């Protein structure tokens, strides 16, 4: 009988352990999926593909992410900073999700409030255009056509960079061109759009009411889309008609620690732990490395500063 009980206890403990591990893995998978969907959503906003944005919203809802109205954000989150107020507006989309995070044997609940822009103007998005021309001779593989570099407040963000030469942007449109082909003149019209996603982390011990949660960690990521079109392109051996050569690129600038539940819990416990991870600058350059734009994204300290 003792042997049977021991076997049953071992089986039960294994089952409980497996269930807990499966739940933890499921939670991690959901976090990654939500992050991926919000990144893709920001790209669709930059490209103004609103049907795709609506499709992403449905997928987020299925993962337990709640869409909040501006009024709900005002009522439930702005009270954390009573000396700051913001008008209730409809130019920002707010999402709320909750995840458990275990640290030091204690289970904490992290509520994430995420802000992204919509079709209306807001401080979370910017756009513009510029034309740049060059008339002196240079080789197609040696001239910069487009460069986008994202930086945090303390340096360049790993992976947040894009470099394209003139050859890379035109080779698919111009037959017979090589990296050493001499370009006699060219003009590129650039258009760009940038979207900021802001993440606010609220932490409390699991089981406590929301009255005990604290805003401990704030971070942003940036999504930048740049389109280019050559009205003029002449090279040794020929030329192409205007508006034939065109393309578009999108990059995400995600600073280390962005949207980190681990960092949020550590900041809840340790007043000296990091509490911010912001995108500080997006630098876009074109032909001859001339500046197209230097974007300084919003770095909100509270939800009330997003408008």
Image (cartoon, rainbow, N blue to C red):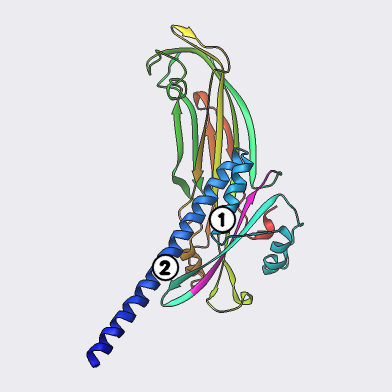
70 relative to 241, above or below:
below
Find disc 2 in the rendering and name its residue: 24
193 relative to 34, above or below:
above
Rendered location of residue 171, percent (x, y): 43, 20
Residue at the extreme left: 3
Q: Is residue 297 visible?
A: no
Q: Secondary structure at mark 2?
A: helix
Find disc 1 in the rendering and name its residue: 60
Residue in front for this viewpoint, 106 or 130: 106
Q: Secondary structure at mark 1?
A: helix
Do the CB atoms of the residues marked 2 and 1 lie less than 8 Å apart?
no
Residue at 35%, 72% in the rendered image? 18
Which region is colored magenta? 108-119
Is 114 contained in the magenta span? yes
Instruction: Specify which label sits upstream in the sequence, 2 or 1.
Output: 2
Q: What is the number of callouts on the image? A: 2
Residue at the extreme bottom: 1
- The reply, left or right, for residue 197 in relation to residue 256 is right
Image quadrant occupied by the N terminus: bottom left
Residue in front for this viewpoint, 273 or 4: 4
Is 256 contained in the magenta span? no
Q: Is residue 15 visible?
A: yes
Rendered location of residue 184, percent (x, y): 48, 11
Mark 2: give few (<14), some (14-19) or many (20+) Cα within 10 Å: some
145 relative to 37, above or below:
above
Q: Quadrant of residue 207?
A: bottom right
The span from disc 2 to disc 1 (Cα, nearest Å) is 19 Å
Predominant SS along the magenta part: strand
Residue in front for this viewpoint, 155 or 47: 47
Q: Quadrant of residue 15?
A: bottom left
Rendered location of residue 31, percent (x, y): 48, 59
250 relative to 277, above or below:
above
């Amino acid at each position: 009988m003792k042997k049977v009980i021991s076997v049953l206890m071992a089986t039960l403990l294994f089952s409980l352990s497996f269930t807990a591990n499966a739940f933890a893995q499921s939670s991690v998978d959901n976090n990654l999926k939500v992050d991926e969907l919000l990144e893709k959503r920001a790209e669709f906003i930059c490209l103004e593909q609103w049907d795709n944005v609506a499709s992403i919203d449905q997928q987020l809802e299925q993962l337990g992410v709640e869409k909040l109205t501006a009024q709900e954000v005002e009522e439930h989150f702005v009270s954390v900073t009573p000396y700051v107020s913001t008008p209730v507006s409809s130019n920002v989309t707010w999402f709320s999700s909750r995840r458990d995070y275990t640290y030091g044997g204690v289970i904490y609940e992290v509520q994430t409030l995420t802000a992204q822009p919509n079709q209306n103007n807001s401080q979370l998005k910017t756009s513009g255009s510029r034309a740049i021309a060059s008339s002196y001779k240079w080789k197609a593989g040696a001239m910069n056509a487009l460069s986008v570099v994202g930086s945090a407040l303390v340096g360049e963000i790993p992976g947040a960079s894009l470099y394209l030469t003139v050859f890379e942007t035109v080779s698919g449109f111009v037959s017979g061109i090589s990296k050493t082909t001499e370009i006699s003149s060219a003009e590129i019209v650039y258009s760009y759009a940038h979207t900021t996603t802001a993440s606010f982390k609220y932490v409390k011990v699991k089981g406590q009411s929301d009255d005990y949660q604290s805003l401990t960690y704030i971070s942003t990521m940036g999504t930048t889309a740049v389109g280019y079109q050559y009205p003029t392109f002449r090279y040794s051996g020929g030329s192409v008609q205007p508006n034939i050569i065109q393309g578009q690129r999108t990059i995400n600038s995600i600073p280390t620690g962005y949207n980190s539940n681990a960092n949020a819990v550590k900041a809840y416990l340790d007043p000296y732990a990091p509490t911010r991870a912001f995108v500080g600058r997006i630098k876009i350059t074109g032909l001859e490395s001339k500046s197209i734009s230097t974007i300084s994204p919003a770095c909100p300290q509270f939800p009330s500063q997003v408008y």
